[in-house]
Image (tube, rainbow, N blue to C red):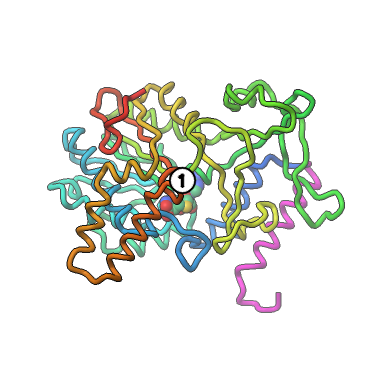
Amino acid sequence: MTDQFDDDFRPREQLRAQLMARIASEGAMPVSTFMAEALFDPMAGYYATKDPLGADKDFITSPEISQMFGEFIGLWAAECWGQMGAPHPVQLAELGPGTGRMMSDALRAGAAAPGFVEAIELSLVEASPALKMVQGQTLAKAPVQPRWIRLIDDMPPGPSLIVSNEFLDCLPIRQAVKVDGQWRERLVGLAPKDAEKFAFVLGGGLSDADLALVAPSLRDEPDGSLVELRPADAPVMDALAERLKAAPGYALFIDYGSATPEPGDTLQAIAKHQKVDPLDDPGGADLTAWVDFERFAELGAAAGLDVYGPVGQGDFLKGLGIETRAASLAKGRGDDVAARLQRQLNRLVAPDDMGELFKVIAFASQGLPPPPGLDRYKPR
Ligand code: SAH
């Protein structure tokens, strides 16, 4: 690279070199370490340095597809707030807010509930300095100004509402493969024939503690099977449960993944809306993995929270009235607008688009009424 103004490529070469040096000296690393470095290395990490979200960027998420998505999150939060007895103040937090679009739409819609927006103290849990700046710009004219924090634990105490979209899928995962009846970790090492390339290599057997992170229903899968371990889920749930037990609150997670544990490799890299090799260019592509909703629900229930769902994103949004909202937004506008809204609606709710693969799960302090959109489901 000769262009001295190109700050996009060279830090990534450095990150690559650092990771290779580390593997050369310490040995192959867990997928989770590779994922964490690729996403959050301060100089070259994918989220640490870029705003990847949008039609012209690397990938697009529900809040970027349609304003209706964030609006319904806002209405959901406002209704939960009412069900909690309208506490003032209420701590509202979003985990991994991306561009801030969802929160901006949510606050606008939440203003329909008298007193709600005035009661909000807003925290954004964000690891990326680049995205914090984008969020600040998006929310510059919002009725509530955010504070940025690193962890749920950093939220001020009190009644709370926590929302998130596509946060859990970026938490680093580990992988294991069954060989000769034993689960062995799948690590990231160097390719045997090309030391300039990363490759998956087989590590040692999983310890009992590691094995506890594998869904019980998957432990007896046959040789050759691959399973994923999600070591970062439990700390998130611990922090959440601590809050929701100390003071009333609801938390909403929307993400993609399976309703029940399934074997298989779900680590995925996306750049410019295309799937790419996850090991090819650390820092240059988004790395995510499917959420295991069953396990996440179990963690919540074990921590003493009421758990609702998971339910498909389509059912959730339709239950909240998104079809009526799309029709009312289209009313009196041209055919173009109506067609655009219909396309947005379809993307969000159609079963063959984001309506089923994307799922919604909510957690509540014990004894609170069921959250809207999930009230047909019994708490577990
Ligand atoms: N919710 C947004 C963005 C999804 S991308 C949307 O739906 O469009 C994932 C977001 O989570 C990014 O903002 C990323 O920087 C943030 N993130 C990922 N892991 C994180 C972590 N461990 N702590 C805080 N933020 C994290």
Look at mark 1 in the image and give the residue it sits on: 167
Q: Residue 223 location in percent, x, y?
A: 74, 28
Q: Residue at x 72, y 51 (%)?
A: 19
**Observer able to see residue 175:** yes
Question: At label 1, which amino acid type do we have?
Answer: Phe
> Disc count in the image?
1
The image position of residue 136, as x and y in percent, is 36, 61
Packing grade of label 1 (10 A; few <14, some 14-19, many >=20) is: many
> Which range is magenta?
1-27
- Where, by quadrant of the figure, is residue 186 drawn? top right
Q: Residue at x 45, y 45 (%)?
A: 150
Name the side, left or right, on which 194 lies relative to 86: right
Magenta stretch secondary structure, dominant: helix
Residue toward you, 276 or 252: 276
Q: Quadrant of residue 44?
A: bottom right
Quarter of the image containing the N terminus? bottom right
| Frontmost residue, 144 versus 32 | 32
Residue at (66, 42) in percent of width and height: 31
SS at badge 1: loop
Q: Is mark 1 within 8 Å of ligand 1?
A: yes
Compared with 122, 7 (above or below) is: below
Which image quarter is the C terminus in?
top left
x and y percentages locating residue 307 in the rendered image: 36, 28
Compared with residue 137, is residue 322 higher up or lower down, i.e. above or below? above
